[in-house]
């Protein structure tokens, strides 16, 4: 190993460290901007309102319990008409609460800005950013 190769290795390490720092700083700035976005603020407000609406919480729990009890049939696609009507009735009752409807609308708007952001990042780096952030599959 020569002095020149050591210098090159040190320079490469410093460049790599600087690039990683720049990425992390940009990610922090992005997080700060996203936290202040109208979509995120609406989602937080909707979540807070929903969290204090006891009647809506009961309707959500009833829907989730019904969906859980019918889970196997739902997964297999074997719900009969009565089961489907029961599930849809609980869902309609849940969605009738303005706090639920607002929260779901806010969640959809926030998810849309997240998809748009992932698309922009993907186009900049040339690979599917969101897919590479997921865990699962054989390797994660």
Image (cartoon, rainbow, N blue to C red):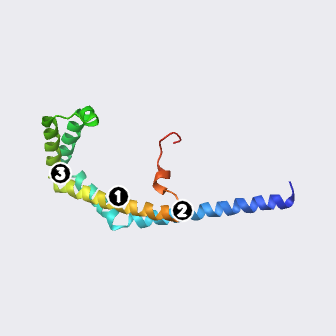
Whether 29 is drawn above or below 133: the answer is below
The residue under the point 35% across, 58% down is 111
Identify the residue under disc 1. Answer: 111
Identify the residue under disc 3. Answer: 95
Residue 111 located left or right of residue 131: left
* Mark 1 touches mark 2? (CB < 8 Å): no
Dot 3 or dot 1, earlier in sequence: 3
Residue 106 located left or right of residue 36: left
Helix, strand or loop at disc 3?
A: helix
Crowdedness near tag 1: few (<14), some (14–19) or many (≥20) residues, C-alpha within 10 Å? some
Identify the residue under disc 2. Answer: 125
The residue under the point 48% across, 66% down is 29
Q: CA distance from mark 3 to mark 1?
A: 19 Å
Whether 29 is drawn above or below 90: the answer is below
In which quadrant of the rendered view does residue 80 lie?
top left
The residue under the point 50% across, 62% down is 27
Q: Please state the horizontal and vertical placement of residue 130, each as a whole percent of the image.
A: 46, 54
**Of marks 1 and 2, the one in the foreground:** 2
The residue under the point 30% across, 57% down is 107
Q: Which quarter of the figure is the N terminus placed in?
A: bottom right
> How many marks do you count on the picture?
3
* Mark 3 touches mark 2? (CB < 8 Å): no
Dot 3 or dot 2, earlier in sequence: 3
Q: Please state the horizontal and vertical placement of residue 62, each as a whole percent of the image.
A: 18, 40
Q: CA distance from mark 1 to mark 2?
A: 21 Å
Crowdedness near tag 3: few (<14), some (14–19) or many (≥20) residues, C-alpha within 10 Å? some
Whether 64 is drawn above or below 1: the answer is above
Q: Please state the horizontal and vertical placement of residue 71, each as a whole percent of the image.
A: 26, 34
Which of these two is toward me, 28 or 139?
139
């Amino acid at each position: 190993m020569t002095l020149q190769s050591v210098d090159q290795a040190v320079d490469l390490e410093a460049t790599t460290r600087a690039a990683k720092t720049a990425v992390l700083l940009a990610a922090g700035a992005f997080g700060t901007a996203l936290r202040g976005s109208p979509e995120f603020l609406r989602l937080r407000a909707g979540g807070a309102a929903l969290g204090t609406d006891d009647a809506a919480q009961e309707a959500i729990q009833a829907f989730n319990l019904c969906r859980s009890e019918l889970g196997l049939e739902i997964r297999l696609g074997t719900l009969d008409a009565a089961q489907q009507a029961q599930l849809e009735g609980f869902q309609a009752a849940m969605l009738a609460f303005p706090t639920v409807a607002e929260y779901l609308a806010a969640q959809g708007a926030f998810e849309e800005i997240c998809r748009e952001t992932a698309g922009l990042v993907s186009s900049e780096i040339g690979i599917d950013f969101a897919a590479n952030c997921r865990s699962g599959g054989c390797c994660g």
